[in-house]
Image: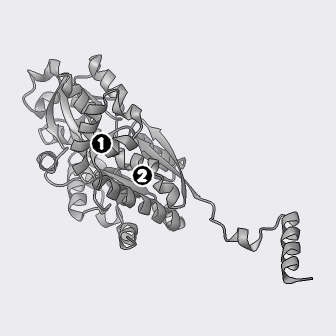
């Protein structure tokens, strides 16, 4: 029997036995399954997640990412702690708060270098509003209680002598539900992001009174640069799944670089049309104004971490009383490796 015939007989035999052939064993490995939670994906705060996903960068990195979208960041954090999510794209703030509670989580890659949050008062209340002290007694819409939009208004109130319970807070989401709550007059003020803010502002339904869509505005509110959305996970997951974490980081860094090198029009074409809330020109304008908020490389700055810690200490008694090691709230290892591979 010739070598060719012996090979044919061999491959036929292993096929009949269900044994992978040498050629098949060299095929592409199965993608790594990751369950990712996010709170309000339609908000431009999380645009890097949607861009990275829709451009196929997770798949290119060898991942099968299942995204679960919750009303706000507090809900996605609960999914992680409860075990139904592996990783979260959420506010960096939560890494500090959870360390204070003895349940550490670690930021792996930064998506937003400034928050892009806006505090606005409804037009019907704007005439009487002179400053944060006038938030007392108001019903304030936030994406979800316990989310970073909630933290912003709590910090501003604390800095002006008010207590957290001097106002009431309603979870209104970050998309069409927020717009509806404002239009129906269910709230007196809100902390939200674009395109919600631009849409309400265009219709003259609100007055913007604090704006972190620029570095200058962020410094005015928080006193320094403030990290926004990050990818975070528990230390246990990171230690057990370093390949998946590196692949996620590689994909996000690639997505951030794509955003930085493309126009708002190009970005809008990638996004789901329903995220535009029925006004595509306004959505493109919102993306353009939001592009400076996104990180160009995924790195978390120590200065930003310090600012977040200072802010949380103002109104979170658990953070104020706990010994916090900021170096344990984030890691540069995966981002540095992703950037070195470029």
Which quadrant does the N terminus fall into?
A: bottom right
Q: Is residue 88 left or right of residue 296?
A: right
> Furthest-bottom residue in view?
2
In the image, residue 176 above or below residue 99: above
In the image, residue 26 above or below residue 281: below
Q: Residue at x 25, y 28 (%)?
A: 199
In this rendering, does residue 73 appear at all? no
Which quadrant does the C terminus fall into?
A: bottom left
Tell which circle, 2 or 1, labels the residue nearer the N-terminal end. 2
Can you give x and y, in whole percent of width and height, for residue 309 in the image?
24, 55
Where is mark 1, residue-wise?
Answer: 265
> Furthest-right residue in view?
1
Can you give x and y, in whole percent of width and height, for residue 175 in the image?
35, 31
Q: Residue at x 51, y 49 (%)?
A: 85
Q: Is residue 333 left or right of residue 215?
A: right
Front residue of this view, candidates 93 and 117:
117
Where is mark 2, residue-wise?
Answer: 52
Can you give x and y, in whole percent of width and height, for residue 181 in the image?
31, 22
Q: Residue at x 24, y 64 (%)?
A: 302
């Amino acid at each position: 029997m010739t070598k060719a015939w012996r090979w044919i007989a061999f491959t036929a035999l292993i096929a009949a036995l269900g044994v992978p052939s040498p050629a098949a064993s060299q095929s592409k490995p199965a993608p790594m399954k990751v369950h990712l939670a996010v709170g309000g994906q339609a908000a431009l705060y999380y645009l890097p997640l949607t861009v990275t996903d829709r451009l196929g960068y997770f798949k290119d990195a060898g991942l099968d990412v299942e995204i679960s979208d919750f009303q706000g960041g507090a809900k996605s954090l609960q999914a992680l702690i409860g075990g139904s999510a592996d990783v979260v794209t959420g506010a960096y703030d939560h890494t500090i708060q959870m360390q204070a509670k003895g349940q550490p989580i670690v930021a792996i890659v930064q998506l937003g270098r400034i928050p892009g949050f806006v505090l606005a008062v409804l037009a019907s209340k704007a005439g009487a509003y002179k400053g944060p002290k006038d938030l007392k007694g108001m019903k304030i819409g936030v994406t979800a209680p316990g989310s970073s939009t909630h933290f912003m208004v709590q910090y501003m109130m604390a800095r002006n002598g008010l207590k957290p319970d001097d106002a009431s807070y309603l979870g209104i989401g970050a998309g069409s539900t927020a717009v509806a709550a404002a239009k129906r007059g269910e709230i007196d003020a809100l902390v939200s992001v674009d395109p919600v803010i631009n849409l309400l502002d265009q219709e003259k339904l609100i007055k913007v009174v604090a704006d972190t869509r620029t570095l200058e505005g962020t410094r005015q509110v928080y006193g320094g640069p403030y990290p926004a959305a990050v990818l975070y996970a528990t230390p246990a997951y990171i230690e057990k799944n370093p390949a998946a974490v590196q692949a996620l980081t590689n994909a996000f860094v690639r997505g951030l670089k794509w955003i930085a090198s493309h126009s708002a029009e190009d970005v809008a074409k990638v996004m789901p049309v329903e995220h535009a809330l029925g006004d595509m020109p306004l959505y493109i304008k919102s993306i353009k104004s939001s592009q400076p908020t996104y990180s160009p490389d995924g790195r978390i700055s120590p200065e930003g971490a310090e600012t977040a810690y200072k802010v949380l200490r103002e109104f979170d008694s658990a953070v104020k009383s706990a010994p916090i090691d900021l170096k344990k709230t984030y890691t540069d290892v995966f981002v540095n490796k992703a950037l070195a591979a470029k």
